[in-house]
Every structure is written in C-alpha cells, then in structure tokens.
Image (cartoon, rainbow, N blue to C red):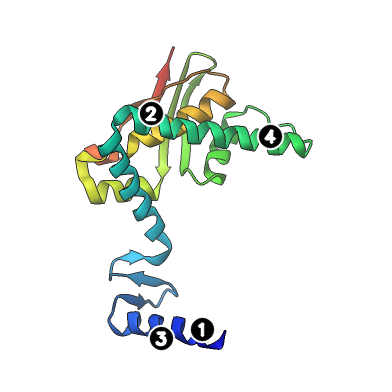
Amino acid sequence: MVKEEKEDSSLFDELMAKNILVSTDKNYLILFKNISISMYGARAWAFTLQQIALKKGEKYIFDLGYLMGKDSAEEVNETFKKLGVFLSKEIKKITSIIEATGFGITEITSYIPKKRVELKIIKNPILEFGKELYGEKSDICLFYAGVYSGFISNFLDLKDCKLAIKECISKGDKNCSFYYEK
C-alpha cells in the first residue's frame, strides 16, 4: 500500500516538474498550462459529444440528449416520490433541478403554459469547451437541446417537446438559447 502511494506521488511530482501540472496561487491545479484540472472532465465530454455527433449525425446526438434529460427528470421525480415530497412544476424549480443534475445553469426566459417555452443557458462548461475546440462546427448544442427537451417534456407537461436552437455561443451569440412553440 505504501509503495502505491509513493508511485502516485512520484507521478504527481514528475508532472509538476515537467510543468504539465502547475499549482497556482489560487490553490488549484492547472493541466497543460491552461485547463483547470477540475474542468478537464468538461473538455473530455465536449470532445466525446462532438465525436458522437460527427459519427452518428445531428438527430442521433439530439435523441441521445433527449433520453438523458428525460431519464434524469424521471429519476428526480421518482426519488422525490419515494421521499414523500411533492415536486411542484414551478419554472424556477425546473432550472434548479437542471443545475443540480449537472446539466448547466439555465434560465427560462419565456413561458406560456402548454404553448411556448424559451430557455437560455447561463453557464455550461461543456458548451464553452465545444466552442473553444470546434468553433462554428460544434454540434454540442444539439445534445443539450435534447437534454433540456427531456426535462421540459417531463416537468412542464409539454409531451414530446423538441426544443430548437435560437442562439448558439459557437455561432457567435452571447449565450445558447432554445425555444419550443406549439
């Protein structure tokens, strides 16, 4: 056991010595001189989602996101039911649930029950890395259009909601935003 710790320590030391992993005065580590170690997973997800979109197509990446969003929303509903907690369908709660499940910080900017919804992404590191890595060719917004469609279908009773992209940071807009109108 002690030997393993020493091996792990020497790898860490070697990465530090080669300036691959750098400590900052803000008490966190930087990988390859420009990526916060805590954000490296987001970069890897951006790469993976883009590769899936390139190999399988736009519909596939949207549908994959939809399945993930719908499954996450259903899981949240089931968990609250088991706990005996009633989960209201308030707009503010939906954005909190999206954030708590790790799909970014969002805001619903427009809502007419059963007719129209518009959602804006405030912060999503995976989309930000998608922009950085792929620029205008990024298809990662399609995945998140699917994810948020799954949540909205579940929580706002807009069955089979399919959000369309209104704005995209990869295309030069300030934020990504999506809309659905019946």
Find the distance from the CA under tag 1 to the CA under tag 4.
41 Å
Say which residue appears at 45% left-offset and 34% top-offset. Answer: 147
Q: In the image, what residue type sits under mark 1?
A: Glu
Q: Quadrant of the N terminus?
A: bottom right
Measure the C-alpha gap from mark 2 to mark 3.
47 Å
In the image, what residue type sits under mark 2?
Phe
Identify the disc placed on residue 178: 2
In this rendering, is residue 160 above or below 136?
Answer: above
- Taking depth in this image into account, of 112 and 47 the one nearest to the observer is 47
Mark 1 or mark 2: which is in front? 1
Provide the secondary structure element on which disc 3 rests: helix
Q: Quadrant of residue 61?
A: top left
From the image, state whether disc 3 or disc 4 is nearer to you. 3
**Residue 139, above or below 28:** above
Q: Which mark is nearer the camera, 1 or 4?
A: 1
Q: Which residue is mark 4?
A: 78
Q: List the residue tagged with mark 1.
A: 5
